[in-house]
Amino acid sequence: MDMRLELVCVPVSDVDRAKEFYERVGFVLDHDHTVSDEVRFVQLTPPGSACSIAIGDGLTDMPPGSVRGLQMVIDDADAARADLLARGVEVSEVDEQPWGRFVHFSDPDGNAWALQQMPAWT
């Protein structure tokens, strides 16, 4: 049985601010629907990803900024860092580890992301 992760909820305090941030990072806006006075569903997808994120109102009871350890694989950590800096995103220096090269950033609420360039031996 296949199981494909397709959507991860990311809790935010200000939907419009978070939406602007993720679009600036390069995520593609798939949906922005106000379902009711209590529910707004915004779906964004990182370029090249089969998994999207959902931000909005009434989607989760997780506190804003509580998600840590979200990770995406990239081809080139230096190029990804340069691209994010050019987009005005605060991003870490490249972190060299035996298991890959990483850059880190957080959204305005503190939800933390890692971008991993896989090592050559993988």
Image: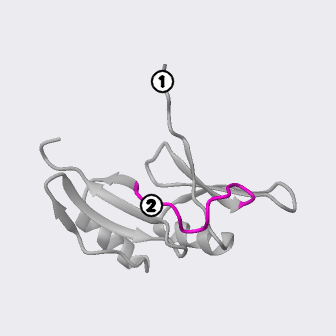
Residue 100 in the image: x percent, y percent?
Answer: 20, 54
Measure the alpha-carbon separation of dots 1 and 2.
26 Å
- Magenta segment boundaries in residue numbering: 57-70
Q: On the image, numbered disc 2 is attached to which residue?
A: 68
Look at 70% across and 55% down and name the residue there.
Answer: 59
Does the segment drawn in magenta span residue 53? Answer: no
Look at 67% across and 58% down and name the residue there.
Answer: 61
The majority secondary structure of the magenta stretch comes to: loop
Amino acid tagged 1 = Asp
Mark 2: few, some, or many residues within 10 Å (few <14, many ≥20)?
few
Disc assigned to residue 2? 1
Does the segment drawn in magenta span residue 62? Answer: yes
Question: How many circles with numbers are drawn on the protein?
Answer: 2
Residue 12 in the image: x percent, y percent?
Answer: 62, 67
* Colouring method of the image: one colour
Q: Secondary structure at mark 2?
A: loop
Q: Which quadrant would the C terminus be assigned to in this image?
A: top left
